[in-house]
Amino acid sequence: MVKIFVGNVASATTEDELRALFEKYGAVSDCDILKNYGFVHMDEEEAAQKAVSALHKHEVNGSRITVEYATTKVRNATKIYVGNVPEGVTAAKIKELFQPFGKVVECDIVKNYAFVHMQRESEALEAISKLNHSKLEGQKVFVSLSLYPTGN
């Protein structure tokens, strides 16, 4: 999976519009807009390269977007560690698990664990208290604040 940063996003732009724009180049697994920027996760490296070169400085809703590979980690978000993630569970599935508690900014799976970044600390803490030791596809998961708040 390739994470792409999209800057200078017009306030009128929706996540669906942004997703549709990138899907012309390949499969999009996730798309989020936060204020005037967003992130698009594409499944294939080759598709991401095409999207980055074709869409950089592309005009969307009167605004020329900046499109580049994401290099910075999420800022101003609370990072949650999710351990014992069952094999085959997708980032979208984990995001779905956390969304009832608040805005999920990003979700990344690494082997059998994941990191979820939530916009508000209070919502993250509620999610942790409700989801720790809960079952995901029949397997007990462990949910806590990440010991490494910045970067993975």
Image (cartoon, rainbow, N blue to C red):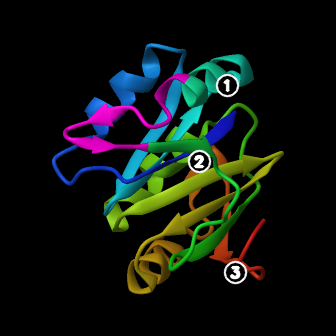
Classify 10 Å Cα crowding around label 3: few (below 14), some (14-19), many (20 and above).
some
> Which of the image's four quarters has the N terminus?
top right
Tell me residue 30's x, y (percent): 48, 37
Magenta-drawn segment: 54-65
Tag nearer the camera, 2 or 1: 1
Residue assigned mark 2: 136
Q: Which structural element holds mark 2?
A: strand
Classify 10 Å Cα crowding around label 1: few (below 14), some (14-19), many (20 and above).
some
The answer to if 56 sits in the magenta stretch is yes
Q: Is residue 95 above or below residue 116?
A: above
Tell me residue 84's x, y (percent): 77, 55
Q: Nearer the viewer, residue 35 or 7?
A: 7
N-terminal label among 2 and 1: 1
The image quadrant of residue 52 is top right
Residue assigned mark 1: 49
N-terminal label among 3 and 1: 1
